[in-house]
Amino acid sequence: MRFRRRCIGLPTSTTPRLEPDGHFRFTDQHRRLLRKLRFEWPDPQMIGFVAGNGYPVPAVHFKPPFGDMTSFDIDMASILGVPKPSAGDPLFRRLYWEM
C-alpha cells in the first residue's frame, strides 16, 4: 500500500494499474518489455556509492532501459510491434512506470 500512497497526485493516465487489493496485473506487454530490459553494471568509480558496504548488482538505466533510441517510448513501441507513439502517449508512460 505504500506504493499506492506514492502515486497520489500522479495523473491517472501514468499511474501504474493496481488491483483494488493492491496486486499488480502482469500482462504480455510487461513480459515482452522485461525480456528486453538492458542491465548494466555500475560504473567502477560509482560502485562504492551504489553498493555501499554491500555488493554491486546489475541495474537498469532509467533513460534508455530498452534500447539506444532517443526516447523510451519509441523503443517500447518497437518491442511491442505497434506504431510509433505520439509525444507523451499515456499508455507508454504508464508502462514505463510499471516496469
Image (cartoon, helix red, strand yellow):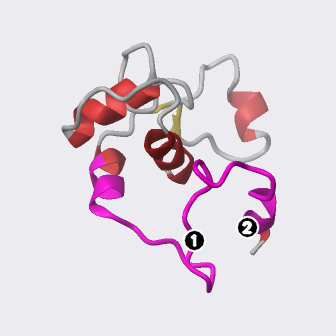
User: Which of these two is toward me, 33 or 49?
Assistant: 33
- For mark 1, does the 10 Å Cα neighbourhood hold few (<14), some (14 to 19), or many (20 or more) residues? some
Q: How many numbered marks are there? A: 2
- Provide residue 82's location: percent of width, then percent of height: 22, 37
Residue 81 lies in magenta, yes or no? no
**Residue 44 falls in image quadrant:** top right
Going from N to C along the chain, the mark reached first, 2 or 1, is 2
Q: Which residue is mark 1?
A: 18
Q: Is residue 5 magenta?
A: yes
Q: In the visual, does 93 lie left or right of 30?
A: right
Verify CB contact (< 8 Å) between mark 2 and mark 1: yes
Residue 23 picture quarter: bottom right
Q: Residue furthest left?
A: 81
Disc 2 to disc 1, C-alpha distance: 8 Å
Secondary element under disc 2, as helix, strand or loop, is helix
Residue at horizontal 46 percent and vertical 48 percent from the top: 95
Mark 1 falls on what kind of element? Answer: loop
Where residue 66 appears, as percent x and y from the top left, is: 38, 32
Residue at image point 45% right, 32% down = 65
Q: Which mark is residue 4?
A: 2
Looking at the picture, how far across and down is residue 36, in whole percent?
31, 40
Q: Amino acid at mark 2?
A: Arg
Front in this rendered view, residue 57 or 8: 8
Q: Amino acid at mark 1?
A: Leu
| Left or right: 30 as drawn, with respect to 58 | left
Furthest residue in direction top, as rendered: 70
Asked if 78 appears above or below 43 in the picture, the reply is below
Q: Residue at x 44, y 72 (%)?
A: 25
Main SS category, magenta section = loop
**Which span is picked out in magenta?**
3-32
